[in-house]
Amino acid sequence: MKNSIVTFLFLSLVVTVFSTCDHDTDQFDGPNLVDRFGEFQLMEPLVINRTTVDFSAGEDVRMTARFNKSVNFTIQLTGTESGAVKLINGFDNNLDETNAIWTGGTTELPFFREELVEVELLVPEAGPLNQTGTVEIVGTKTYEGSLFTDFETPPGTNIFFGNFEFELTNNTGRRNNGLAAQGDWYYLFEGTDNVVPNFFTGLIDIKSTITGNTYAPVPTTAPEDLYFNFFLYADGGPHGIAVVQFVYDSNNTGAFEDGQDATFQFAGDYPLNWVGWRQFSHTMADVGMTEEQVSKIVAIRVLLISDMNSQPSPPVPVDFGIDYLTFTAGRPLEL
């Protein structure tokens, strides 16, 4: 009897050990050996779900592909006319609507236009994949916020030039030379500080009437929640500085009056020492304006300054572009 009990306990232990070592059913929490050491294989090629897309109608672009293991991947979308670039990065073995969807935004300015977009799937570990495709934008993305101006429409008398001793060149003004950050047009400042070394090279006041309103239309008057967004273009020249100010109707006349209305400015200027377009966003609390003052912005002032401390002799020309001035509520403009 005693031997029977021992034998039963031994057999029970063997069954328990083998049942806990079922490699076919147990989950393994460590890294997959194929993910770590296996050679990459493309199991299903890149597929784009549509040939044309109208982002303005709420459509999107979805891409699929499948790999034999999880890898770092990048989907690069490039506008053939604008040069805009959208990058979608991830780590997975499968591309689907959760990690490979495009709603029309951009990673690198400018914005996409109605144009053909080249799509390429990149997997650094795999080398050249030759997984490409195209999609045509027939309607561009509608961005949030209240547009102040994008210079697409001639401003007429809504832009006031400060003359004084400024030395802007004839190139200053609306330009459509293919460099716009959004649409076809932007505003270019170009000038010298060679004749009268007064640092200030040029100035314009963009009246709020450019929007069709007396005051700038804003989505909120709470200064800490109201963001002002704009794009600046620089060519890398180290001698130019951009300045943006806000003109408040301090005497309540309901009109822009040069030299009479109060101005507010962000704490810092913008040294133009990069190449290409950049986005800048600040709250109106950063400017120091109150809720009442925010509700009565009668103009936005833009200046070009020559940094005479860094200029050679004689001074070289300075320039910059500005585009897509918008107000957003709660957060900066999301590209």
Image: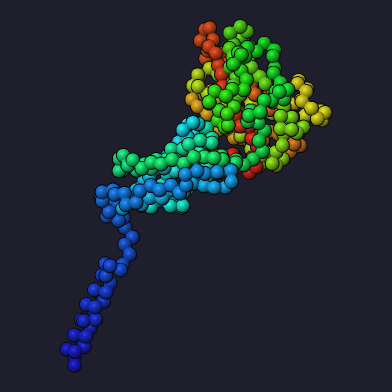
Q: Is residue 252 in view?
A: yes
Q: Is residue 107 in view?
A: no
Name the residue located 29 percent from the left edge and 49 percent from the top edge: 41
Q: Position of residue 215 (x, y in %)?
A: 75, 33
Compared with 60, 233 (above or below) is: above
Residue 256 occupies quadrant: top right
Q: Position of residue 108 (x, y in %)?
A: 49, 34
Which residue of the protein is positioned furthest toward the bottom in this rendering?
1
Of the pair 309 and 139, the residue shown nearer to us? 139
Image check: 292 left or right of 302?
right
**Coloring basis for residues:** rainbow
Residue 121 occupies quadrant: top left
Name the residue located 24 percent from the left edge and 81 percent from the top edge: 12
Compared with 95, 12 (above or below) is: below
Q: How many marks?
A: 0
For the N terminus, the image quarter is bottom left
Name the residue located 52 percent from the left edge and 44 percent from the top edge: 53
For the C terminus, the image quarter is top right
Q: Position of residue 276 (x, y in %)?
A: 50, 27
Image check: 237 left or right of 330?
left
Name the residue located 61 percent from the left edge and 6 percent from the top edge: 195
Residue 333 occupies quadrant: top right
Of the pair 326 and 287, the residue shown nearer to us? 326
Q: Position of residue 68 (x, y in %)?
A: 31, 53
Image check: 331 left or right of 91?
right
